[in-house]
Image: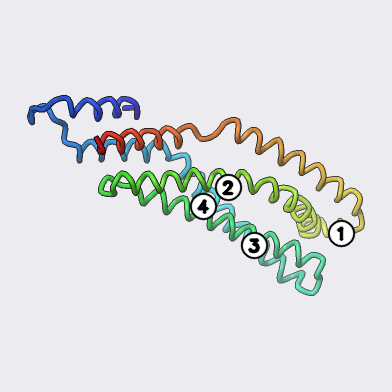
Amino acid sequence: MELHELTNIWNGTDNKMESSLRINKVLFMEVSINQIKSDLKSLRWTSYFEIIINVMFLSFILNFSISQFSEIKFLIPALLLIAFTFYSMFFSVKKLSLHYGINAQTPVMVTQKKLEKLKLMEIRERQMLYILIPMLSPTFLIVGAKAFLGFDLYHYMNWLIAQTAASVVIAIIIVFILNKFPDKKLQQTISFLNEIAESEKE
């Protein structure tokens, strides 16, 4: 059952005054919340995937940092990548926490706030790409070249600067595409709960 069908059922129940025809709204909310969580399952699995990848990468970058502890020019980009990894993991865990905090026993207003936080987090993540892509592009290249090829990219600074400049353009294109095609399921669930909240006030 889609969310718009559930909305129609909810709005129609107040017009049926006979108790035998009135829907059990507790059961309705359970069905609705299950549908909402089903619609947001891609967010859940994406968060799990990001955590797994970040844990694997963290193991690699920590070992690299230890091996390059005396080489400041390699240690600094490695530390930047470590900071980014923890930042990414924090966001993924926070999204999962909000997702699993959604249940039928929670008041509609609280659930609304959690979904709005999820939406705000997605917006912030997109905006941060303007900074993260240009910043992480050279650091990934420096660390990757050293770790896998034993190559020092600092000897090719002009090329590194050109790659960083190109990453700015890439960041703008990626954010534009993400803004053009936002998560429709998340917006639909927020709109659905807004209608439920408005109906409860009447």
* Residue at which label 1 appears: 152
State the image coordinates of residue 15 (x, y, percent, origin top left): 17, 25
- In the drawing, does residue 41 fall left or right of residue 161? left
Q: Which residue is mark 3?
A: 83
What's the residue at 77%, 59% (across, down)?
Answer: 147
Q: Amino acid at mark 1?
A: Asp
Decide: is 38 above or below 128: above
Cα–Cα span, label 2 and label 3: 17 Å
Secondary element at image label 2:
helix
Q: How is the image coloured?
A: rainbow
**Few, some or many residues within 10 Å of mark 4 (<14, 14–19, 20+):** many
Mark closer to the chain start, 4 or 3: 3
Q: Give the Cα separation between the discs numbered 1 and 2.
A: 34 Å
Residue under circle 2? 124
Q: Quadrant of residue 69?
A: bottom right
Using a 10 Å C-alpha cutoff, classify the residue at mark 3 as few (fewer than 14 neighbours), some (14 to 19) or many (20 or more): few
